[in-house]
Amino acid sequence: MKEERYKKALHMLNAEADIEGSCIVSRDGMLIYSDMRDVHAEVFAAMLATLLSSAEVATDEIKAGVPDAVVVEGKNKKIIVTGAGAHALLACITSADVDEVREALQKAAGAIDTIASEKK
């Protein structure tokens, strides 16, 4: 079942990096899977998809290519959103340095792309 595989991918991400919570979202903003607490996951998912999509359009406008990730830095935490293939995106919340979680995030995004691309 895909849900178990998504859960495992997020668990591995959280184990490899200092991640407080993460979620997988469809490109159109529908929540696929989340392990975040104290977040309205469905609403947050829609905002994340809009954020990444807007960044992709903006970078395309200046001919900068597709962004690897979008980082929103707050006072105490960061939101990092990255594409996970054509069907999904991956987002996480962390207070760690972005470079410290980037490799684990990309690895998890690859696993999620594989899962999301499979036929049901």
Image: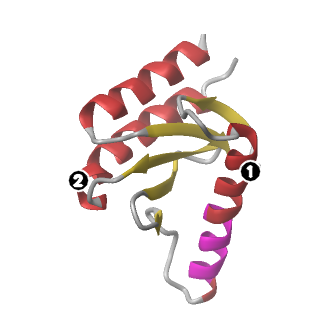
Q: Main secondary structure of the magenta part?
A: helix
Above-or-below relation of 39 to 46: above
Q: Residue drawn at (34%, 53%), measured in percent from left and top?
A: 95
Q: Residue drawn at (67%, 22%), measured in percent from left and top?
A: 119
Count residues near mark 2 (Cα–Cα under 10 Å), then give few for <14, some for 14-19, many for 20+: few
Counting from the top left corner in percent of width and height, residue 117 is at 60, 32
Q: Amino acid at mark 2?
A: Glu
Horizontally, residue 34 falls left or right of residue 41, namely left
Q: Amino acid at mark 1?
A: Ala
Which residue is denoted by mark 1 in the rendering? 46
Q: Which mark is residue 100?
A: 2
Counting from the top left corner in percent of width and height, residue 118 is at 61, 25
Does the segment drawn in magenta span residue 57?
yes
Counting from the top left corner in percent of width and height, residue 46 is at 74, 50
Horizontally, residue 19 falls left or right of residue 41, namely left
Above-or-below relation of 49 to 20: below
Region rendered in magenta: 52-60
Secondary structure type for disc 1: helix
Q: Could you tell which of marks 1 and 2 lies nearer the N-terminus?
A: 1
- Where the N terminus falls, by quadrant? top right
Q: Residue drawn at (41%, 57%), measured in percent from left and top?
A: 77
